[in-house]
Amino acid sequence: MRTWSEINWRHILRMIGIMLVIEGLAIMSGIPFSLYYGSHDIHALWVSGVITALSGALPLLLLKKHRENTIGKREGYIIVSFSWVIISLFGSLPYILSGAIPDLSDAFFEVMSGFTTTGSSVLSDIESVPKGILFWRSMTHFIGGMGIIVLSLAVLPFLGFGGSQLFAAEVPGLKTDKLHPRITQTAKRLWLIYFGFVILQTLLMMAGGLSFFDAICHSFSTMATGGFSTYNDSVAGFSPYLQYVIIIFMILAGTNYTLHYLLLHRQVLRVLRDEEFRFYLLMILGMGVIIGGMLFAYHGMPAEKAFRDATFQVASIVTSTGFVSADYLLWKPFIWFLIFLLMFTGGSAGSTGGGIKSVRILLLVKTSMVELKRLVHPRAYIPVRYNQQPVSQETLAKVLAFFFFYMALFVLGSIAMSFLGLDFESAVGAVIASLGNIGPGLGSVGPVENYGHIHDAGKWILSFLMLTGRLEIFTVLVLLNPGFWKN
């Protein structure tokens, strides 16, 4: 194990520099929309993009290549965690310079929410924000959905050395599914599938009457499972056709991208046999039917609307997208309590969805059932099986550790937010919505509210929880362990 001085800081700074250059170009991608709609944010986008790109180019010019192939796990964790914080700081510039969000705490919260695909917002009047800034806001979802590290590996093949360490630290899941022996090719395949879905959804939403701007912004948010909308009421005013399109693509976005790859190669049976996929679909459709039945019975909604609203909100919460088609806090308390429980689930491993992930929930259930059997048959060998294969004790230990840290962060975060003045309902809602990268929570941060009223300290705490949840907890928490920096 290398000491602090032996960590390859040159490579770390160069990698962060590369990502800042990419981010600078992405910021300026909103300028064409500013020109088209005649909004007054061109200067802010141009200056922010140039500052960000030049800041990234500086370490690339000053630091020569040095031990480029010696990147290890520690460098991987440092690069991923540090880069997400740094790109969020630079990503705040367009908001601050344009005056859309002049306060640093608010701007950083908004950008971190975008990059981590959380979808929480401090904005109360989204429709008044200039179009170029709104496009950058949605672009943060698009970049963060698959991950800026994975994007860097996809477009810059020379980063392949040590790329597996970066890939494993950023891509969510119990293990890294490689679609190709070379990690750069895996990254390219993931981004091609991701971008292909964005294009397809954009076309379908334009066919439903949306402008290209609104269609692509909502497609960015859907496939990234982010939830930023260009409208104050999210997608509540959309036609049933558009809402069904979003439901389908939310479910696709929350599915393991390895399964999409297999499906494209006509391996349908392997997809249908995947236990996580079946559990994930059953959870969404089952809860959609149950809650839809309650809306039909207790709220007198027409059957189709009850099923659509219920399935939309269940899919939005489970996949951590956070779009809102209805204010679920106006439903019966038992219904929104079920929705609150769904906030602890999440999409599939290897998807853009957040949360604990369906596979971990499934393994926790299987482990509990096996332990019950072992009480009756203490001498029997009863392994936990997943996809017909026994699961190692090491994997189960990681799942249990992840669940423990997840719940510990939830409890500690809720206490901290309560201390800062939020009522209990709002505190637990804000924390689980941030940790699970969901967006809308409960109480004063519910589906039709925003996070603007929260104390600045609370916004930084929630930003930390967003980052920790997006990077699967261990990638961030390992940096807080003193042993990580010692020999």
Image (cartoon, rainbow, N blue to C red):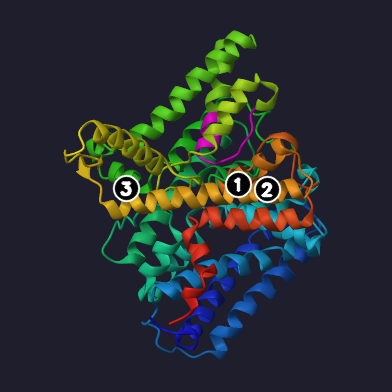
Residue visible at 61% across and 43% down? Answer: 433
- For label 3, the crowd category at 10 Å Cα-Cα, with few meaning under 14, some 14 to 19 and many 20 or more, is some
User: Which numbered marker is on residue 411?
Assistant: 1
Eyeballing the image, is 263 above or below 240?
Answer: below
Residue on which disc 2 sits = 415
In-image side of 374 versus 52 (left or right): left
Q: Identify which amino acid the numbered label 1 is placed on.
A: Val
- Distance from disc 3 to disc 2, alpha carbons, whole Å, reads 42 Å
Q: Can residue 319 be found in the magenta stretch?
A: yes
Q: Which residue is most to the left?
A: 380
Q: Find out whether residue 41 is within the magenta segment.
A: no
Q: Amino acid at mark 3?
A: Tyr
Residue 119 seen from this side: no
The segment highlighted magenta reads: 314-327
| Whole-percent x, y for residue 474 in the image | 47, 60
Measuring from the top left, give residue 6's x and y in whole percent: 45, 87
